[in-house]
Image (cartoon, rainbow, N blue to C red):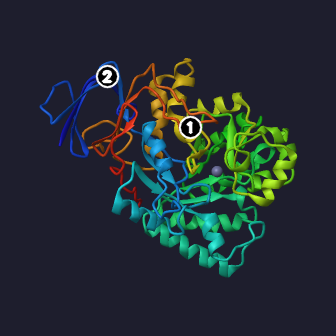
Amino acid sequence: MTTLIQNGTLIDPISRIHTKCNLYIKDHKIQSVTSDRPAADRVIDARGKIVAPGFIDVHMHEGGLNPDGTLDESILLSLLSMGVTSALGGNCGNNAFASPGEYLDLIDRRGAPIHLGLFAGHTDARLRAGGTDKYAPINESVLNKMLSALQKELDAGCAGISFGVKYTPGTTFDELLKVCSLCKKASKPISAHIREDAAGVIDAAREMAEVGRQLGIQVEISHIGSMAGFGQMSETLQMLDEYVLNGTNLGIDCYPYYAFSTEIGETTYDDGWLERYQTGYDSIELCDGEFKGQRCTEEIFYKLRKEAPRTITVCHVMQPQDVDSALLHPNVMLATDGFLNNGQGHPRAAGTFPRFIKNYVHTNRISLDDAIYKMTSLPALQFGLKNKGRLCASADADIVIFDPTEIADTATFDEPVKSPVGIDFVLVNGEIAVEKSVIKKRDAGHSLRFW
Ligand SMILES: [Zn+2]
């Protein structure tokens, strides 16, 4: 099958392409970037549109199984609808399956809406190895059991190891080093929801940067907006910049919203959170269950913490200038941190990428090329996705075609999975997966393995 995408403006920051040209695709690969119009089985006219590499989301949370035993693909479909063609899940220390390697095998057997790689989660592996008290350090036998489980997942092609140290406060620095040594041996990165946010974020970010510096491994600091978005952003970024300047391989990601999302039972809301964020109970919006759509009260808070700790919340508490400065920082890439439960959650899962263009490019705070760099090139380069994030011969045919002035998110906190507008086509693996906001194919994606 051959496809010609003609008359569009191609943007590929890695290849320094920003030009009106045609893209010729054969099967799953880009065959050429050309001013010719070779005969093709299918022609897509992209006049007036931007043709870019499919967006890459390095921080999302894959879905588990539905009650009927099928795979919950709602997050993958949301990502696809906004132009994401490759993603990395298993973040913040958690995996949807006990074995992320087996999840990748499942995707290869049945296909997926987009390409998906997974980190192996430290928090889950720790729990399964017998570290049942998240507030306490683990003993030698639990440590060894956890290390061998994580090694098995790295051997299965997982992208690296993810941490949710905030959710597992008993994790010592020594435990971090021992776990990360597996990544050093395998030349794989770690991604980290660091130990503390707000006033504690500088020490917490330094701790992870130190792991990277001491072991010489790649570190990704996750969703910086929800970690340092309370008045600590410029100091945090400056400190991390110094590590980068001194040679540590360190990346940072962020989503373009001023509210974070987590379950109400998480450690984020342990005693002291009101003082930490200098806020009140009503900053929490409840996203599912009995109180869906309502703002929280003290009474509801304690009731749900006890009776329904998995209730998804959105907490409207980050400072806009902090989140904005992170998103515009040259070393920060875009990522959703999206997770959905029964189609409910934070609109970042369905709006992050178009919203970044709408709120930052359309208001002239960043150029379209630089925005696309943060959504394609930077994540591809940082995570070694060699054939992705670019438009050149032999690159994978993962492509998004959108209207540069009309593209916008429409998902809101009330309607978190509403599809964006202005996206004409999304191609996954050379196949049309989305056409004019309609999903046409939901199994063109395969697993991303890192060996
Ligand atoms: Zn996280």
Q: Secondary structure at mark 1?
A: loop
Q: Position of residue 53 (x, y in %)?
A: 37, 36
N-terminal-most mark, 1 or 2? 2
Q: Residues within 10 Å of mark 1 (few under 14, many from 20)?
A: some
Marker disc for residue 160: none
Q: Residue at 49% of width from left, 68% of height from top?
A: 153
Mark 2 belongs to which amino acid? Answer: Thr
- Residue 23 vertical placement versus 59 (above, below): above
Q: Residue at 39% of width from left, 49% of height from top?
A: 113
Is 251 on the left-hand or right-hand side of 4? right
Q: Position of residue 98 (x, y in %)?
A: 54, 69
How many labels were placed on the picture?
2
Viewer-side residue, 250 vs 167: 167
Quarter of the image where one finds residue 231:
top right
Q: Nearer the viewer, mark 1 or mark 2?
A: 2
- Residue 81 vertical placement versus 44 (above, below): below
Q: Residue at 78% of width from left, 54% of height from top?
A: 304
Mark 1 belongs to which amino acid? Answer: Asn
Q: Secondary structure at mark 2?
A: strand
CA gap between label 1 and label 2 equals 25 Å
Is 449 on the left-hand or right-hand side of 310? left
Marker disc for residue 331: 1
Is 383 on the left-hand or right-hand side of 91? left
Q: Position of residue 403 (x, y in %)?
A: 40, 23
Q: Residues within 10 Å of mark 2 (few under 14, many from 20)?
A: few
**Which residue is label 2 attached to?**
19
Label 2 CB-ligand 1 distance < 8 A: no
- Residue 99 vertical placement versus 433 (above, below): below
